[in-house]
Amino acid sequence: MNRRSYLFLAPLAGLMLPGTAFAAGPECVQSPGKVIELCVSVDGGNATYEVRRGAVQVLAPSALGMTFAGEPQARYTALKGATRSASDTTWEQPWGEQRLVRDNHTEMTVTLEGDTPLNKAVDVTFRLFDDGFGFRYSFQSVPKGQDVDVMDDRTAFDTVGAYQAWWYEGLGQERDEYLYTQTDARRITLAETPLTLKGENGLYLSFHEAALVDFPSMLLEGDGAGNLSAWLMPWPDGVLAHKTGPFTTPWRTVLIGESAGALADSRIELNLNEPSKIKDISWFKPGKYVGIWWEMHLNKSTWGSGPAHGANTANVKHYMDFAAKYGFDGVLVEGWNTGWDGDWIANGDKFSFTEAYPDFDIDAITAYGKEKGVNLVGHNETGGAVVNYEDQLEDAMAFYARYGVSQVKTGYVRHSGTIPDRDGGKQWFAGQYMVRHNLHVAEVAAKHHISIDAHEPVKDTGLRRTWPNMISREGARGQEFNAWGNPTNPPEHVSILPFTRLLAGPMDYTPGIFDIEHGKTELTRRVQSTLATQLALYVVVYSPIQMAADLPENYEARPDAFQFILDVPTDWEVSKTLQAAIGDYVVMARQPRGGQDWYLGAVTDEEAHTLSQPLDFLAPGKRYEAQIYKDAPDADYRTNPTALVTDTRVVTSKDSLDIAMAPGGGFAVRFKLLD
Ligand code: NOJ
Ligand code: CA
């Protein structure tokens, strides 16, 4: 039956028409404000769901279901027991982009009856919000304790109409560290999520998942006609997931809004995760850090031992002095532990996580830090040698805890698809194996009151709600690419991230490079932004920990710009996307947690943009001093990137501000409450 006739018949619920055996449904549910409607049906052995937003059909009937080893693909023959409920609550994040999060949703659970033993009763729970929905399977008929192998996930998202997509090809060896391309969504082959689409119908969609626990990551495979289906990262033997019955899957999520900002301001990701399992997370404090990091990426010093070893005691003390002088919370030190000499990516199993190089005196360093009020931020690069890390994990965390280190950056630099497991298998970076590993690290770390900032991570799926010590991740092309070249991130990258990668959760982008050219003449071998952009990123790219990534001397050379980094907080009461065009520009405003000020950040692509921004987010009747950091009139990321003008003026919520950005430019403001 083609899609059109199916839709026509759908309202004839449960009617047994000739030739359409096993038709059941639809069972429908609407979001709290009746913005979105979702209906589930069973027809001809297939279970499908379809979605409308007002008069617009967003998803045509799209497949549901999974297939297990040892049985054929199930035919779903009946739809049973639709139960519906609604809930409207508000909960508080211990830290975050928004203190209070409203969770206003309706819910419907249906049971799909399949004709195979393991698919006999499959509960599917749909949760609808006005800005999107999520759904997950609960395989109730897999007997308790029985091991099963998931071989196929039939879940589909069949979009209706023409869409543009921002995406990159999944399964690449550099994991999620790729530039986005914008194409017709029909050209998607295999895309990572969050996968963001903009429709000719005026709608913005983003496909992702929430609460990815003990299951493989989902990519989306396109069929050339706008239909997307789940593609789970397999184990080396081709099995998608090893589960024990009965089990529940992660949520598959779809954000639906009328603007790019509606996607960025959605909190569905968090709402579909479980409440915190860590009773008291007061040992993690959002904040800013500096580190022995950029100097290695610039080849000014080395991770490995020798005369240029960056992680030496004197250098760490120098950074600690700088951090203390300007009020930074921590100093990240990479390359302090043995194992970096030679090809550390190939020899990740040589890393020790408790043995320091002789020129790194951790006792003296942590004592010095204590005196100065600066924390040492730990670093565990694994080189993707996960077995070696797991074998030392308990010791690694106990070691750091003993020295008062409460924040650790991890790293998994190794080509995806080559991560060795204990059985000699080669794993993808985000299959079930690595999903388990990432959570295991966070759990062990939590026991030691340590928070984790994972680089080369499994993509975020809102797990920070349940494990608030999973504070930040990389999982996209970050600033490091701006040291390496081949090529560096083009300006539009940071105007795409807020509507793609950042929909998943915080990112440790490591902003704040002031020496834009760092000795390189070629544009594609140095930072492609203005100085104002580097400031704006502290507002545009959310993370509870933000690095001031450049060398101390480069900050001291530009006190005019540095002041913004010193002022900007990393924990927020409210966050709002004010204006955006994906890949062109974005303007965001955030209010500090527990504070009265506001901060604004805007970035643009390679084109100059002047935007008029109403300040109606400010409290009415109050006066603010707007401390403005903007591109100079002659600034240009290609020819004059560090030309910055600072300016102050008094504004109220009735005013508008002209945000004038140079090509590759940015704009940052602190609105300081005056009365
Ligand atoms: C890649 C990480 O993203 C980067 O921040 C780190 O410096 C290197 N790996 C070395 O661990
Ligand atoms: Ca990286």
Image (cartoon, rainbow, N blue to C red):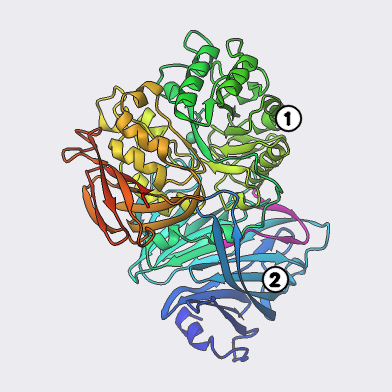
Q: In x, y percent, where is residue 166?
A: 39, 54
Q: Are marks 2 and 1 in contact (CB under 8 Å)?
A: no
Q: Residue at x 61, y 10 (%)?
A: 358
Q: Identify which residue, 375 or 113, lies in the foreground.
A: 375
Whether 494 is drawn above or below 513: the answer is: below
Q: As drawn, which residue projects farthest toward the top?
A: 307
- As helix, strand or loop, the secondary structure at mark 1 comes to helix
Which callout, 2 or 1, points at the residue further toward the start of the chain? 2
**Residue 338 seen in this snapshot:** no
Whether 395 is drawn above or below 207: the answer is: above
Q: Residues within 10 Å of mark 1 (few under 14, many from 20)?
A: few
Q: Residue at x 65, y 64 (%)?
A: 66
- Mark 2–mark 1 Cα distance, whole angstroms, equals 38 Å
* Residue pointed to by mark 2: 123
Q: In x, y percent, where is residue 565?
A: 40, 36
Q: Residue at x 71, y 49 (%)?
A: 279
- As helix, strand or loop, the secondary structure at mark 2 comes to strand
Q: Quadrant of residue 138?
A: bottom right
Indicate yes or no: mark 2 CB to ligand 2 under 8 Å: no
Amino acid on which the number 1 mark rests in the picture: Asp
Q: Residue at x 49, y 83 (%)?
A: 7
Q: Identify which residue, 595 or 136, lies in the foreground.
A: 595
**Residue 209 seen in this snapshot:** yes
Indicate yes or no: mark 1 CB to ligand 1 under 8 Å: no
Amino acid on which the number 2 mark rests in the picture: Asp
Q: Which residues are magenta?
A: 237-252
* Residue pointed to by mark 1: 391
Q: Is residue 251 magenta?
A: yes
